[in-house]
Image (cartoon, grey):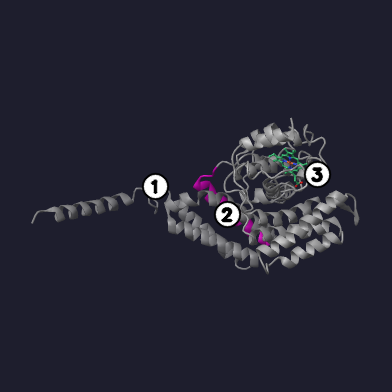
Amino acid sequence: MSVVAVLLLACASVGGTADPTADARRVVLAVQYVGTDYPLAVRDGTVINAFEYDEQTAFLRDAVALYAQRVPAGRHAAALEALRDAHARRVPAPELAARARALAPPLADELTLPAAPAAWPPLDRARAVFATVCANCHGATGMGDGPLGKPLVPPPATMAVPAWADERAPFQLYNTITLGIRGTGMMGYAPQLDEQTRWALAFLVLTLRTPAPDAPPAPALPLARLASRTNRQLAEDLVTQRRAPDLAAGLVLADAARRAPPPRPTPEQALHAVTTAAREAAALVAAGERPRADNLMDEVVAGSLREVAQDLRLRDAAGTDALLGAVRSLRGAITDGSNVDARVADVLARAEALAVANQPGGAGPGWGWLPTALGALLVLAGLVVLLRRPR
Ligand code: HEC
């Protein structure tokens, strides 16, 4: 198959639109890309791959210029310059990676680029597109051995290799799939593939490492976390939360979480998750582990609580807002380490009130509204009759 055939194939698939945020995305991608691919270009202060190094230098130069154009006097101008300077000085890889990792999220935020898809990405669609389009270069299993990839310099990425996959996050791959990499065989797919499909491809590519049939049940992780953290970071989180015995098990769980959306929790399950997390967070703060406590609350807020907020509101809008407020206060207390126990007690009380509101005979809507509604209807009917009576 020729390159032209691949391009035609790509054009024939799900229609997308040109990326309206291309410049902003280019800035963020440059930072992400250099952060992960620097070790391919520089080792021990020496350039080991001139093509790769020059490519990175050009990306950073363009990023600095585009950023200045888009946000004159932007908040991250100095940090972006510093990253470029560190790259030019060929600093050790961990230093460069740390700078890039710290800069990319606030930069994306300032440029208002969403770092996660709006809904769970359709992985089945991504599988079909990968097999017909991407596999021509990247190979059916992502080993970079597709027939069209053979003559390409640089060669197609080998996505199924752990050393590659573990250090990248879907947000970075989404940006690459959207924009492409100039000067290489990797084109941007924004015109051909819609946004959800591109996100799904970014998720799919990071699961090629482990075969699906072995997958354990997926842990429920917030979509925002799945999209912006690397495989390794997700696995480390799972290990610290004692949900995986070791890094290898954590990596398998991370893949499972990316492959399938967790079942939607019932409001009762979500309330239970919130109270359990609040209690555990208090214990973590007492043990001096504030970041882990914050992580735990973030997970439950962005995950199960968000999923059921709408259902809870229908049940008791004021009570739901009170619970969300209490959770927010608890997170504030965790951050500055004060009053945590009182805030936890508040969360427990609000959650309990909402759970009670759903029980038959509870304080909530139940059928208790029926007499009132009937009464109101009768009054209304009476009024209508009164008004209609011929004088
Ligand atoms: C014509 C060949 C070709 C096709 C088709 C192709 N790619 Fe690529 N892709 C490449 C090459 C070459 C690179 C390596 C570029 C580099 O190293 O700078 C690459 C790199 C990538 C990267 C890695 C970027 C990084 O961070 O290192 C991702 C992700 C990717 N491709 C995804 C896809 C997806 C998804 C598709 C299908 C929609 C696809 N590619 C189709 C050739 C191709």
Q: Nearer the viewer, mark 2 or mark 1?
A: 2
Residue 280 quadrant: bottom right
* Tally of numbered discs: 3
Q: Nearer the viewer, mark 1 or mark 3?
A: 3
Q: Nearer the viewer, mark 2 or mark 3?
A: 3
Determine whether, in the image, residue 274 is placed left or right of residue 72. Answer: left
Q: Secondary structure at mark 3?
A: helix
Tell me the distance, in whole angstroms, between the alpha carbons under discs 2 and 1: 27 Å
> Viewer-proximal residue, 133 or 224?
133
Which residue position is annotated with label 1?
A: 360
| Amino acid type at image mark 3 | Ala
Task: Please give the range of residues in magenta.
Answer: 264-288
Determine whether, in the image, residue 355 is placed left or right of residue 116. Answer: left
Q: Secondary structure at mark 1?
A: loop
| Amino acid type at image mark 1 | Pro
Q: Residue 301 got which mark?
A: 2
Q: Is residue 268 magenta?
A: yes
Which residue position is annotated with label 3?
A: 163
Q: Can you give x and y, in whole percent of width and height, for residue 79 in the image?
A: 75, 65
Determine whether, in the image, residue 59 is placed left or right of residue 315. Answer: right
Q: Residue at x 79, y 56 (%)?
A: 58
- Ranked by sequence position, the earlier of labels 2 and 1 is 2
